[in-house]
Image (cartoon, rainbow, N blue to C red):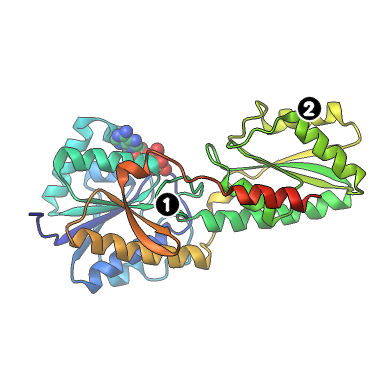
Amino acid sequence: MSKTIKKIAVLTSGGDSPGMNAAIRSVVRTCAFLDVECLAVYRGYQGMIEGDFVPMNARSVNNIINKGGTILKSARCEEFRTPEGRAQAHQQLVNAGIDGFVVIGGDGSFRGATIFNKEYDFPVMGIPGTIDNDIFGTRFTLGFDTALNTVVEAIDKIRDTASSHNRLFFIEVMGRDVGHIALNAGVAAGAEEILIPEENLGLERLLDSLKRSKKSGKSSSIVIVAEGDKTGKNVFELKEYVEEHLPIYDVRVSVLGHMQRGGCPTAYDRVLASRMGVVAVEALLSGKTNLMVGIIDNEMTLTPIEEAIKGHTKIDRELIRVSDIMTV
Ligand code: ADP
């Protein structure tokens, strides 16, 4: 029989993403609603090891649903990767009377949580918070929608200057292993080409496409490059390559960088975070553990964390077809 859960901890860990605050708020308020004590852990697993805990009540999370980043701070913690570090974290949780925790983070944070769960039979629940949308078991991770909208807004602005000067822009967006941001932003912002890690179409195709584009009467072009794309060239090398082979183009590069991680969460991310927090707390209270909350076909789901960290969500191949048609 699983132990009754009377006190839940919540933490944010790894890379931050917009919507994490809305998820913290949801976990805290669901605990308050269900009369369960809630503690916040500051600075991810590092704060857990150091016992950096603060009691939370429904009012502790006023006015944070609209804020980017995480009020609990996030951290990367090497010590938690060691059995000694995790033993210390466990002792701190036991000392504080905590019966289970909700970790909001990416696959690394989940890997830590599942190892901890196995070692100490400690109830854990994951909420996927990462802009890359690269976690298996959910159609959307928290922050993806916000980052996508941020990127589209930035590309729209770059398009204004690209068209004023008849320029070709290579715009690098985040996405180390997956091209969700690049592909969706590329379609939404009307890019000529989208280079993603899942599909290496080769440099020849890029040149052909740019030539065709010029021939068809377009005077400026935008190419979106996911940071993990597999052409074998980084975005600056791509610029040089195209300038060398297509001197007709005046090429510029823009790397969007960390601005993609910040900003107020979109309505979609706020709603998703609110739903995920409720499910995470309810699942823990019903004796479930070692699961990640997700959303599939607009239904809330629970996937074993071990499965969630094994794979990535596949990109939507239909979007590649749509993009090809749109760039006729
Ligand atoms: P993210 O959660 O965004 O993927 P990281 O990969 O940096 O970010 O992971 C966040 C933290 O999770 C790490 O700093 C570490 O404390 C913990 N962690 C990651 N992988 C492991 C692991 N294999 N064992 C134990 N803890 C881990």
In terms of image quarters, where does ligand 1 lie? top left
Residue at image position (40%, 45%) is 106
> In the image, is residue 191 above or below residue 267?
above
Residue 190's x, y, as percent? 74, 53
Q: Earlier in the sequence, mark 2 or mark 1?
A: 1
Q: Residues within 10 Å of mark 1 (few under 14, many from 20)?
A: many
Towards the viewer: 153 or 296 = 296
Q: Residues within 10 Å of mark 2 (few under 14, many from 20)?
A: some
> In the image, is residue 199 above or below residue 280?
above
Residue at image position (30%, 63%) is 279
Q: Secondary structure at mark 1?
A: loop
Residue 64's x, y, as percent? 42, 66
Amino acid type indicated by mark 1: Gly
C-alpha gap between disc 2 and disc 1: 36 Å
Left of 29 or right of it: where is 2? left
Towards the viewer: 217 or 201 = 201
Residue at image position (85%, 47%) is 220
Q: Is residue 76 visible?
A: no
Residue 182's x, y, as percent? 62, 46
Q: Is residue 128 visible?
A: yes
Pointer 2 residue Cβ closer than 8 Å to ligand 1: no
Q: Secondary structure at mark 2?
A: helix
- What label sits on residue 241 in the rendered view? 2
Left of 94 or right of it: where is 177? right
Which residue was labeled with disc 1?
A: 129
Left of 71 or right of it: where is 59? left
